[in-house]
């Protein structure tokens, strides 16, 4: 279909081509992580699947696409960008299916919706950088936790603006995503120091701002992000340091409006202790939740692509964003 090819050319491939099963495994095993990238990989895999899927009727074709979307959505439970991204793509196709479109019509609508999601997600991260960097002052020292493309975008932009920032990166146990952030910032020319998570209190005294990313925002403005974020927020609060969250608006979790809680992913205990150690200490129990919740009162504001939003303002932007089902 010529139009699909034209639409496709406008979107640069961020990840190697993958089947739905490969993308699912890649997400589950965290070979690609971070909420924005998780969502874009799922949208890409769903788009590529929709392009090739066969079916003898529109209903049959649509059922296959829905099933693929369902599988991708289930790869990780906490980052709401994943279901939100997949739902956005499916909504494109569903509108065409429900209005009696042919297989080619539905295919075209699905592919376009995926491309639309991917480009707007990448644009959002860039915009967040621009909006957030204006809140950073010359010579600011920043603490960040985990590995967030949106938070990195703010820090890189502040550096581009010549603000001479200095950044402390928490290691972010157990998967050490902070190492990735430190490597990226240092390679960009930013004055970067890696610290262990438990040193955060010590360095908070030397810090002007905390900037972190986001996996999900609940309707009351609470933040769900990598485990340890809430501790950093409490320390920032105690030290009267600004706590800012860089978050694309598709990270707002609609279901929290109906009182549902965000699922907190629990991962394999071997991420926190070697198997041999576990075998030698059979009485020790393990818990490995990988996200936590920061209450809104510890958050100064969200930096979204739509502008700066205080935690209490999340509800008001929610309605606009959920025009798809
Ligand atoms: C990553 C993490 C990041 C957010 C935001 O967790 O908590 O802070 O996902 O990232 P994990 P981004 O490594 O378990 O996926 O701004 O890139 O969306």
Image: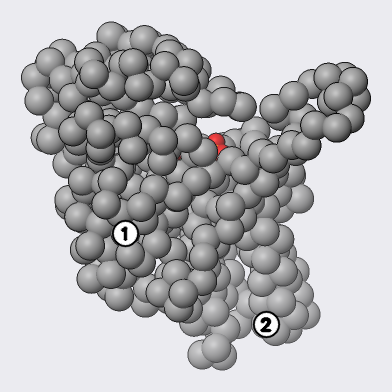
Checking the image for residue 96, the label placed there is none
Q: Give me the residue at 31% from left, 16% from top.
A: 203
Q: Is residue 115 left or right of residue 62?
A: left
Q: Residue furthest left?
A: 138
Q: Is residue 246 visible?
A: yes
Q: Give me the residue at 18% from left, 33% from top.
A: 240
Residue 283 is situated, as x and y percent measured from the top left of the image, at 85, 32
Mark 1 and mark 2 residues within 8 Å of each other at the beta carbon:
no
- List the residue tagged with mark 1: 221
Residue 287 is situated, as x and y percent measured from the top left of the image, at 69, 40
Mark nearer the viewer, 1 or 2: 1
Residue 144 is situated, as x and y percent measured from the top left of the image, at 35, 27
Front residue of this view, candidates 1 and 191? 191
Against 300, residue 135 (above or below) is: above
- List the residue tagged with mark 2: 58
Q: CA distance from mark 1 to mark 2?
A: 40 Å
What is the total number of numbered labels drawn onto the structure image?
2
| Residue 54 sits in quarter | bottom right
Front residue of this view, candidates 15 and 53? 15
Q: Quadrant of the N terminus?
A: bottom right
Q: Is residue 194 left or right of residue 157?
A: right
Q: Which structural element holds mark 2?
A: helix
Q: Residue furthest front?
A: 283
Q: Give me the residue at 21% from left, 48% from top.
A: 301
């Amino acid at each position: 279909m010529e139009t699909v090819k034209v639409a496709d050319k406008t979107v640069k491939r961020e990840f190697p081509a993958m089947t739905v099963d490969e993308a699912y495994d890649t997400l589950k095993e965290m070979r690609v992580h971070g909420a924005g990238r998780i969502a874009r990989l799922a949208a890409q895999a769903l788009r590529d699947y929709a392009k090739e899927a066969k079916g003898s009727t529109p209903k049959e074709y649509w059922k296959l696409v829905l099933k693929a979307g369902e599988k991708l959505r289930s790869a990780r439970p906490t980052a709401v960008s994943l279901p939100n991204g997949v739902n956005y793509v499916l909504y494109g196709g569903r509108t065409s299916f429900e209005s009696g479109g042919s297989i080619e019509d539905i295919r075209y609508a699905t592919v376009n919706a995926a491309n639309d999601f991917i480009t707007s997600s990448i644009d959002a991260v860039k915009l967040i950088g621009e909006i957030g960097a204006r809140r950073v002052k010359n010579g600011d020292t920043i603490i960040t936790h985990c590995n967030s493309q949106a938070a990195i975008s703010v820090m890189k932009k502040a550096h581009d603006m010549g603000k001479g920032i200095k950044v402390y990166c928490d290691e972010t146990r157990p998967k050490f995503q902070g190492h990735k952030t430190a490597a990226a910032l240092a390679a960009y020319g930013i004055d970067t120091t890696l610290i262990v998570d438990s040193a955060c209190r010590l360095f908070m005294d030397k810090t002007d701002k905390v900037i972190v990313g986001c996996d999900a925002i609940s309707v009351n403005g609470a933040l769900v992000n990598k485990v340890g974020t809430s501790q950093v927020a409490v320390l920032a609060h105690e030290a009267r340091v600004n706590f800012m969250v860089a978050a694309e608006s598709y990270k707002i979790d609609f279901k929290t409006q109906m009182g549902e809680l965000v699922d907190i992913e629990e991962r394999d205990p071997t991420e926190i202790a070697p198997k041999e150690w576990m075998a030698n200490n059979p009485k020790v129990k393990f818990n490995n939740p990988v996200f936590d919740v920061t209450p809104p009162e510890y958050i100064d504001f969200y930096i979204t692509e739509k502008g700066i939003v205080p935690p209490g303002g999340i509800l008001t932007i929610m309605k606009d964003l959920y025009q798809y089902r």
